[in-house]
């Protein structure tokens, strides 16, 4: 059983991971909204271009869409990485607690 101070340290770690996940999620959502705003603001201009200008404009819109997809993919990978880091943190914390208890009881350590 974890002591009060051990639980506090674990909770502080969990809180840090929760805050990081929330902050990166919020920032990611804002970035996606801004990319969508850019696309929305420029799409209305499409009819004002003709010929090569229209082709360049469509190319620009396609690039914006590609960038938006890349941003979404990158944000997804960040979330996966945060989840893996959180999992590794919990495993490490539990191992340290188990080893400390084992040491107190004179047992061998897990490593």
Image (spheres, rainbow, N blue to C red):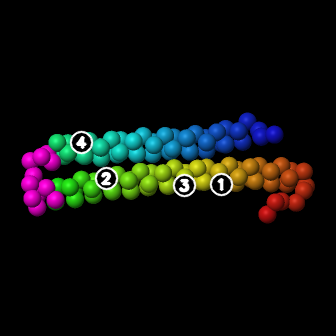
Q: Residue furthest bottom?
A: 111
Q: Could you tell me residue 1's position as x and y percent?
A: 81, 40
Residue 51 sits in quarter: bottom left
Q: Residue furthest top?
A: 4
- Badge 4 or badge 3: first in the primary sequence: 4
Q: Could you tell me which secondary element the residue under label 2 belongs to?
A: helix
Query: Is there CB contact under 8 Å for labels 2 and 4?
Result: no
Task: Give the crowd class for mark 2: few <14, some 14-19, many >=20 residues within 10 Å.
Answer: some
Q: Which residue is mark 1?
A: 88
Viewer-nearest of discs 2 and 1: 2
Left or right: 97, with 77 as reference point: right
User: What numbered label is drawn on residue 65?
Assistant: 2
Toward which corner of the image does residue 53 lie, by quadrant?
Answer: bottom left
Disc on res. 81: 3
The one nearer the camera, 43 or 5, is 43
The residue that label 4 is drawn on is 40
Closest to the camera, between mark 1 and mark 4, is 4
Classify mark 3: residues with Cα within 10 Å, few (<14), some (14-19) or many (20+): few
């Amino acid at each position: 059983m974890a002591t009060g101070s051990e639980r506090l340290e674990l909770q502080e770690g969990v809180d840090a991971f929760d805050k990081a996940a929330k902050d990166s999620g919020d920032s990611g959502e804002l970035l996606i909204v801004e990319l969508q705003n850019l696309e929305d603001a420029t799409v209305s201009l499409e009819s004002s271009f003709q010929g090569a200008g229209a082709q360049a404009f469509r190319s620009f819109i396609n690039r914006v869409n590609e960038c938006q997809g890349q941003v979404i993919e990158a944000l997804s990978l960040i979330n996966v990485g945060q989840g893996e880091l959180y999992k590794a943190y919990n495993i490490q914390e539990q191992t340290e607690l188990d080893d400390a208890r084992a040491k107190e009881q004179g047992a061998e350590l897990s490593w």
